[in-house]
Image (spheres, rainbow, N blue to C red):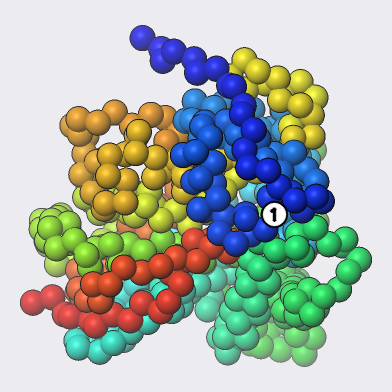
Amino acid sequence: MPAQTVPLRPVPGPRGLPWLGNLLAFGKDPLAFMTRLRDEYGDAVTWSLGPRRSLFLSHPQHIAEFLASREHSYGLLEVGWSFQQITGESVIRSTGAEWRRKRALVQPAVRPRQVRQYARVMVDSALAAADRWQDGSRVDVHREMVVLSQRVVIRTLFGNDLGDRARAVGAAMAVAEQVMARELRGVGLLLPDRVRTPSRRRLLRALAVIDAEVHRLIIARRDGPAAADGTGSAGACDEGGGDDLLARLLEARDEEGRPLTAKEVRDEAVTLWAAGHETTSTALTWTWYLLSRSPEARARLDDELDRVLGGRPPTVDDYERLTWTRQIVKEALRIYPPSWVIPAVAREGAVLGGTAVPAGTAVWCSQWTAHRDPRWFPDPAVFRPERWDADAPDVIPDHAWFPFGGGPRGCIGARFAQVEAALLLATLAQRFHLELPSEEVPHRTGILVQPAVPLIATLRARP
């Protein structure tokens, strides 16, 4: 029996300031602001971000309808000049026919068959990390996960570790992400593109480093290693094999036989890079934090790893058999979804819950507030991977959990990210427990939801 349709009845939210609207409250703590909209006003609330009228959605039915109709009924909401500079005109910022063309070209690079091939890189990278760890030593969990996930994304994207260049390029990517996060929450979001603040100039310098490296790699793929540095030395640029994401982007052809241009390849590669490593490292950081606070969940993980793997490293064929491991990741993504908001702008004719949405309205939904809604998740702040047991008693509505978005514009790397997180967790958890302090860890909100303080763990080797 289909669920009864929930009508959309927007109500006005908190009053804002002239020109700024609710920007200051949103910028101070966007997660608390959106939670307030849900709890104090309801499932559909109007508010304003600067001068733009906005609509915030909290009911899973409205969220599902919104995400399903984004391609046809909604346009992009630009979320800052910095975001545009980093992602360029990649599939994430394209619309209409151009979006369909680019998605068709990029999607094959992250299909399940390709993810199977990348799984070995994931496990090998985690084994190398575990080999460096020592019983009793202390590590910064987020930093360790950043280094690990960045190694995975660089090896799967570019075919190697970039050697001595990896540190400089990784630092440049970190600067780019920091600037983008700050702009999202401040008045910089409303500044004209022509304004060059100190932060924007920092971003341009960081992107120059990133773009030079990506350009070098593209040249190496298209013209051979000697062309990468202009020396004529074939040994000057060892870029690995030709089965990585970059090679697939360069080989892709649309229905008319056209490849992606060098600029389009750059945009897709940088977007995959930025989205890939930081999202996974953040998700794993929170996963270790939650596991350290749940001895029962950790013991059940140990049992599953011993039973399924028997002491050997995991493979992609173990992914479906590692049921509890996947549920741990899924529950961590529920409590601490790295991506916390999805916005779009209503076009003429947009409808939600049977109600017309005025053209130009910015429509928002939040993974954070939906995942922590007590109507769908009793005791929502409590880490319970058993919520996702096949025979769990509570029915979780569709789109009450959507860490990777949904509908036709859902994250094309969702399968890659879920396999990566589970295999990295399984590989490391086979050999180590991470002991973290028992204190509650606050979060900070930028582009992603991350710990606001360093998480320093003591490594304990499993017997």
Q: Position of residue 392 (x, y in %)?
A: 20, 34
- Where 143 falls versus 154 (above or below)? below
**Residue 278 in the image: x percent, y percent?**
51, 66
Query: What amino acid does circle 1 point to?
Result: Leu
One can see residue 253 in this view: no
Foreground of the two, 222 or 352: 352
Q: Which image quarter holds the N terminus?
A: top left
Q: Is residue 403 left or right of residue 46?
A: left
Is 243 on the left or on the right of 204, as rendered?
A: left
- Please report the residue visible at 42 percent of the width from the left and 76 percent of the height from the top: 453
List the single residue furthest toward the top. Answer: 1
Residue 66 x/y as whole percent: 60, 30
Tell which of 12 and 122 is nearer to you.
12
Q: Quadrant of the C terminus?
A: bottom left
Residue 37 quadrant: top right
- For label 1, the residue is 23
Q: Residue furthest left?
A: 463
Question: Looking at the image, is 32 positioned above or below residue 206?
Answer: above
At a point 71% along the width and 89% down the height, the residue shown is: 233
Residue neighbourhood size for the residue with mark 1, other residues' Cα within 10 Å, grouped as few (<14), some (14–19), many (≥20): many
The answer to whether 194 appears left or right of 348 in the picture is right
Can residue 440 be seen in this snapshot? Answer: yes
Helix, strand or loop at disc 1?
helix
